[in-house]
Amino acid sequence: MKTVHFIIIVLISGAIAGTIHGTVNFVIVEPYLDQAIEIENRNLFASGDEKDTPEFWVEYEGYRVWQKSGQILAGAILGTSLGALFGIVFALARSSLPGNNNIKKAIVLAGIMWFAMYLIPFFKYPANPPTVGDAETVVLRAILYLSFIAISGFSVVGFYKLSKRFQNNKKFVALLGYGIFISLVFFVMPDNPDEITAPMNLVNEFRLMSVLGVTSFWASIGVILGFFWNRFDTHTETTPSYN
Amino acid sequence: MLLNFMSESSQIYASKTGISKLAIMALAIVFTAGLFVVGFDQGHIFSLVYGDQAFEDLYIHELTHDMRHASGFPCH
């Protein structure tokens, strides 16, 4: 495949998958965001930081429209970004992935990245709706979240490389090694410092919708990039590999 | 000319690690920039043009606000 084709299909795949993610969020996550922001507004009125006036609601409607309209656009941007990472990893790891065609291989990789870079970090630092986060701790939370994602992602690569030294039970060694290591990291890293004051049923339902939204991205990116790769790559083999 | 260079001289054959460094670099930049825009910008990008006012306006933060929460990034 030519480099320019590679870059284009990776970016387009990411943008499409991201747009799907944004659209799914628009339908299933937005109602929970609205509920959470309503609570946030009530808290502002109760504390006296804001007054329940027509001017407040005009300003509020203005930025809520801006925020909601950004959901799909931000999905496309985030999708293009994560798609770029997915494309790099897929190109480097494709020959080692199981599957007899690129769609299957890409779906397997998307599943691994979803698990290691989203689901496991999510259990430690789950998504929160507005009204939960404290502005004073946002930098600390960003560092913790990014660090956990990076540690989890790189440790998958590390244990995969390590497992290749073993003749038998390669998958078992990689899985066991990753499981033990990430469990240690899970308990060693500090928890999210923010106290949750919003109703837990709202928070839990929001988190479930968040997982469904992100999962729609990883499922889409695997299928779409695999499809494009099959269409544009006429030179490489697609024989199964389980190394 | 750049496209010709990319098309003709840099082929990708997924043999071992047969991916051009140019492609990796370009995609790594896209990854980093996109992640920052959606996940972490608090006015930093527009501050290059609008100065400190950008940290008050938070246009990109507000535009990506809902996706930021929905995809698990820390927010205010």
Image (spheres, coloured by chain):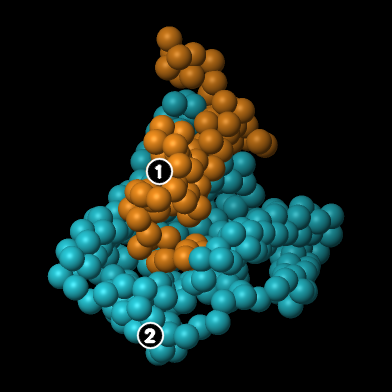
- Identified by mark 2, the residue type is Leu
Quarter-wise, where is residue A113 in the image?
bottom right
Instruction: Name the amino acid type tagged 1.
Output: Gln
Looking at the image, can residue A183 be seen? no
Indicate the chain coloured orange by its letter. B
Q: Residues within 10 Å of mark 1 (few under 14, many from 20)?
A: few
Badge 2: how crowded within 10 Å, few (<14), some, or many (20+)? some
Chain A tint in image: cyan
Which-is-in-front pick, marks 1 and 2?
1
* Residue B36 seen in the figure: yes
Between A113 and B60, the one nearer to me in the picture? B60
Q: Which mark is residue B53?
A: 1
> Residue A66 shows which numbered tag?
none
Question: What residue does disc 2 label?
Answer: A202
The residue tagged with tag 1: helix, strand or loop?
Answer: helix
| Chain identifier of the residue bearing label 1 in the image | B
Marks 1 & 2 on one chain:
no
Q: Nearer the viewer, residue A132 or B20?
A: A132
